[in-house]
Amino acid sequence: MAKITLDNLAHSYLKHPTKDDDWALKELNHDWVDGEAYALLGSSGCGKSTLLNIISGLLQPSQGRILFDGHDVTHAPTAERNIAQVFQFPVVYDTMSVGDNLAFPLKNRGADPKYIAERVNAIAAMIGMEDQLKRKARGLTADAKQKISLGRGMVREDVNALLFDEPLTVIDPHMKWELRTQLKQLHHDFGHTMIYVTHDQTEALTFADKVVVMYDGRVVQIGTPQELFERPAHTFVGFFIGSPGMNLFDAEIAGTNATVQGASVPLADAYAPVAGHAQIGVRPEFVRLRAGGEGLPARVLRVEDVGRHKIVRLDVGGTAANAILDEGEPVPAGADRIVFEPQAINVYADEWRVAPERRQGRAA
Amino acid sequence: MNKTVNQKAWFLVLPVLILVGFSAVIPLMTVVNYSVQDTFGNNVFFWAGLDWFRDMLESERMWNALGRQLVFSGIILAIEVPLGIFVALNMPKKGFWASFCLVLMSLPLLIPWNVVGTIWQIFGRVDIGLLGYTLAKLGISYNYTQDFFAAWATVIVMDVWHWTSLVALLAYAGLQSIPDAYYQAAKIDQASRWKVFRFIELPKMAGVLMIAILLRFMDSFMIYTEPFVVTGGGPGNATTFLSIDLVKMALGQFDLGPAAAFSLMYFLVILLISWVFYTVMTNLDKREGR
């Protein structure tokens, strides 16, 4: 177990990157605190797997350093780093039995046979394959194979970190939930540093203490699930996390007031004049529908009942927006205005969140 | 689902039957026809029953040729398969050099058999051949027309030169189909190079290697042209393999009856050995699947 430090790390798959777009992973400084569970969240192709492969040593970064507990391992081979990694698609050694597959990493490190047997049994119980240890791995179903891959990743107790690269993609939903719980339990019991790459926000939010959101090769926010929900640091975070994502409107910001499409929207705090492209972001949970009176003119397009709540699809002067109503709450008759809860409004300049100048009603 | 019964559909396979009949069955039957008859010339044949087969089974000449043939096939398989795998493992995976190597490797496969024979026949000559001349200058006694070992070595090296590429290309195709994730996982699991080969590369190549071995066995078992051009089956009978012997018998001596019996038995031996190969290998595969 170790603290993993990324120091000025960046990677490009090109030999001579010139422009910003050439970098698959933009310059990054970050400490992965020893023993925490992180989720690395982002859409496909945002650099998540690149980052993971650099940490495990499968890829050499174009620049920067990686430190394990302050010890430079940037050019150390994978074996030396003692890291476990599970990949998106199952990798099993076809000609070996399930048990031998699980024992493989331990055998390669020359562990004691008694200890190996013990660990293999423990892991087999965890992934629910105790009765299949003698069976050849060839011909198993994809999710059984992936369970073996996961098991192989967890079999070593002394690893510096456990990396998961979208490991549950091929697993069916019921088992997904169960394995995720197992992983959390494992983290709880052993306190490994875990990094879990996913593009599924539910997976990320339930698994991790801290969620690292990546966008376009850049880490845009690191925070607890709550922080990501309430204060998305980048419009991508607002949009990517939440279902549906955050509503964004072009706005002019002046003090405690934002002007959206000519209508005035009160803000909870005062903001300095915003440079660049100004927007306000409000999560659908904090959008209220009104019939007449104050607020932004909006047209209800349709209402989707998703069980726990209703999603109201709106057209706000040509911009699509959503509101979420509780299951029991009716859509007001003749609703043609929306208002926002001022505390829930975030202000963005060129996609990045702007902190308020001072908090209203509190000492600055 | 109810199947429509329409026996007329059998007529649709008629063209294939006719084609196969003319291209395989009838020629084979002519051979069968010769194998059970004898003649004293003038195109007069009379029934000989299984005499020729009995003769052939008792013929030391045939057993010797079969023995030489098995040794030859065994040696070239033992060289070409491991060497082909080794070459495939060391070929570049992608880029310009991968294509370059592929082209280079396929070159020997594109050369006609008799040309290969001629190339090596000249190559090995002590007076004008690069190989023969060099060996002679180095003081090594080398003469494939006189010396038993030189003749065998030349024929074997020639076959290795000609056909290792085939094994290498097939093994290479097998290797290319292994996803990167396997190698990455092996690195994470801290597997040694040998274990990567043993548990990832070899199992993934097993299927194509089976085909390679089968092809190389059948081909080498039927080899004719190259040794015929280089050594003519000599010195003595040292490199007289089955097909060389067969041709000598059928066209040299014009013993059609014994030659026909010989070729039928030859055919059955190839069929039998190929079947054994195939069954053993597919069973190995199945047993591992359990």
Image (cartoon, helix red, strand yellow):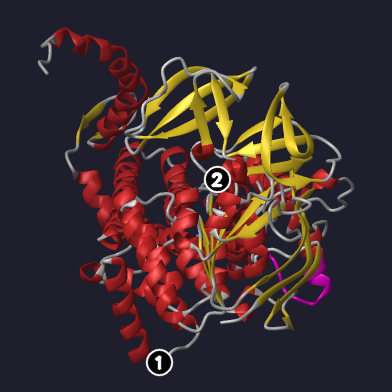
Q: Secondary structure at mark 2?
A: loop
Identity of the amino acid at label 2? Ile
List x then y, in percent, for residue B204: 46, 56
Which segment did they paint magenta?
A: B134-143
Residue that mark 2 sits on: A241
- Please say if B178 is above or below B17: below
Identity of the amino acid at label 1? Asp
- Identify the image quadrant of residue B106: top right
On-image quarter of the N terminus of chain B? top left
On-image quarter of the C terminus of chain B? bottom left
Cα distance between the residues tagged 2 and 1: 46 Å
Residue that mark 1 sits on: A112
User: Which of these two is toward me, B242 or A107?
Assistant: A107
Q: Label 1 marks which chain's residue?
A: A
> Is residue B6 toward the left or the right of residue B160 in the image?
left
> Is residue B1 toward the left or the right of residue B103 in the image?
left
